[in-house]
Amino acid sequence: MKTKHILFSALLSSLSAFTQAQHSLTQIWATDATLPVPESVLYSAQGKVLYVAQIDGKAGEKDGKGGIAKVSTDGKIIAHDWVTGLNAPKGMGIVGSKFYVADLTEVVEIDVKSGKILKKHEVPGAKFLNDLTIDSEGNIYVSDSDTKKVHLLKDGQVSTYYEDLTRPNGLLAVGSDLLIADSGTLKRLSATKEITVVAEGMDKSTDGIEQVRPGEYIVSSWAGVVYYVKSDGTTEKLLDTSADKTNSADIGYDSVKKIVYIPTFMKNSVVAYQLK
């Protein structure tokens, strides 16, 4: 009888731990559906604002229709046209007073205060620049999904940082490492260019990456599925809006309030979710 009690207690403890390990997303708000083809969201903790990259056209065309909007953290659109005249803007990042965005074949440098375009850094041989991340040293990394490369913009010079990937999209600089969402697999690229697999088996349209805590991440996929990647490499499905054809492109994240911001692409809005 005592043995049964001990086993039952152990089972309850295991079930409790399992339950506590689960995570979820609960919708908080959604913007008006007036953001033309939002591909990426960047949360600025300093500015307490969301930047939204709007393709407003086809994702792979140089048509000059693209731009960047500013949205408040309660879902109100502050400016539809903070920056205009881009092509197919996607991943974004801020370092100091400079704002950077991947724009098909070039990285565009913008003044944070004025929204004025300062410079365009052409990436030689680029076809489909996608996500962008900036490390603690101010080095800028940008993925090219079509050429299967990651490029580095450092001191105004562009070079190829790594190649031979499958179809790299999401990037996230963590310390001296670079996390890469590569066709359903989350990979870690060390400073010595060694690749290890963090998690795999996700939808092949993996898009954005955000860190929740060391070793744990949220990974979105364009198809509409959002995953929680645990420290042991297992994944947990947080959201699946693929049935109603709502995409979940390159996400933004407020790490203090634990809010995930998801651009819906064809649905022309950004949706905020509370992570629990």
Image (tube, helix red, strand yellow):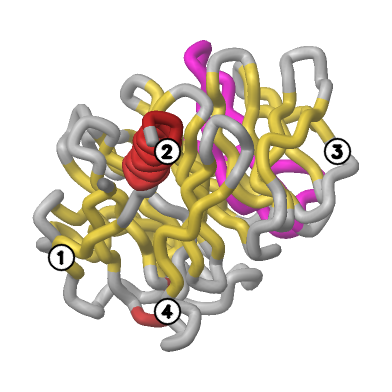
Q: Nearer the viewer, mark 1 or mark 3?
A: 1
The amino acid type, in three-letter code, at marker 1 is: Trp
The amino acid type, in three-letter code, at marker 3 is: Glu
The residue that disc 3 covers is 163
Q: Nearer the viewer, mark 4 or mark 2?
A: 2
The CA span between labels 4 and 3 is 31 Å
Give the residue displayed 43% in from the left and 62% down from the top: 85
**Callout 4–callout 3 Cβ contact below 8 Å:** no
The amino acid type, in three-letter code, at marker 2 is: Lys
Q: Considering only order in the chain, which callout, 2 or 4, is on the residue closer to the N terminus?
A: 2
The residue that disc 2 covers is 4
Q: Nearer the viewer, mark 2 or mark 3?
A: 2
Q: Secondary structure at mark 4?
A: loop
The CA span between labels 1 and 4 is 15 Å
The CA span between labels 2 and 1 is 48 Å
Residue 144 belongs to magenta span: yes
**Callout 2–callout 3 Cβ contact below 8 Å:** no
Against 228, residue 174 (above or below) is: above
The amino acid type, in three-letter code, at marker 4 is: Thr
The CA span between labels 4 and 2 is 49 Å
Q: Considering only order in the chain, which callout, 3 or 4, is on the residue closer to the N terminus?
A: 3
Crowd band around label 2 with a 10 angstrom C-alpha radius: few (<14), some (14–19), many (20+): few
Q: Considering only order in the chain, which callout, 3 or 2, is on the residue closer to the N terminus?
A: 2
Find the magenta span and give its range: 117-145
Residue 222, quarter of picture: bottom right
The residue that disc 1 covers is 29
Against 267, residue 236 (above or below) is: above
Q: Is residue 175 visible?
A: yes
Residue 107 drawn at (x, y percent): 58, 42
